[in-house]
Amino acid sequence: MTYREASLVARERAQRMRDDPATGQPRWTRHGSLVMDWVEVFAPVVFESRVSDWPSTGTLLLDDLPFSVRDPQTGRDRTACYIFCALGYDDGRPKM
């Protein structure tokens, strides 16, 4: 998916649209800056290698946490994205 497509989907799901200055009507925008900003902020964390070598024995925990937003039209919460995490233990100490 391109940045433009991903930004449009994110704005649609969050119901975050700008109003057209001429008509006052909500308008969809496909500007990719939303996802560009997310990549700039989160890519280093996602791609940074904090552990050079996973232990061959021990425990590896994987989990996700849904991030919800409230739909202003219905008042219901819905999942906007998931935050994933991996945690391992090396010499009895947790490593993210």
Image (cartoon, helix red, strand yellow):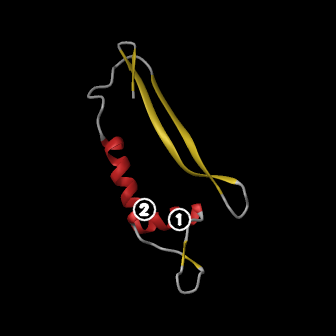
- Tag 1–tag 2 contact (CB < 8 Å): yes
Give the Cα separation between the discs numbered 1 and 2.
9 Å
Whether residue 65 is visible to the viewer of this picture, yes or no, is yes
Dot 2 amino acid type = Leu
Q: Mark 1 points at which residue?
A: 11
Q: Quadrant of the N terminus?
A: bottom left
Q: Is mark 1 on a helix, strand or loop?
A: helix
Residue at image position (53%, 86%) is: 22
Mark 1 or mark 2: whose residue is earlier in sequence: 1
Whether residue 2 is visible to the viewer of this picture, yes or no, is no
Residue at image position (39%, 67%) is: 32
Location of residue 8 with respect to 70 vertically, above or below: below
Tell which of 90 and 27 is nearer to you: 27
**Location of residue 15 in the rendering, given as x and y in whole percent from the top left corner:** 60, 65
Q: Name the residue under label 2.
A: 34
Residue at image position (29%, 35%) is: 49
User: Residue lying furthest top in this view?
Assistant: 92
**Location of residue 30 in the rendering, given as x and y in whole percent from the top left corner:** 45, 72
84 sits to left or right of 69:
left
Residue at image position (44%, 20%) is: 59
Location of residue 44 with respect to 61 vertically, above or below: below
Report crowding for label 1: few under 14, some 14 to 19, many 20 or more residues within 10 A (C-alpha): some
Quarter of image, res 48: top left
Q: Is mark 2 on a helix, strand or loop?
A: helix
Dot 1 amino acid type = Arg
The disc at residue 85 is: none
46 sits to left or right of 59:
left
Location of residue 46 with respect to 96 vertically, above or below: below
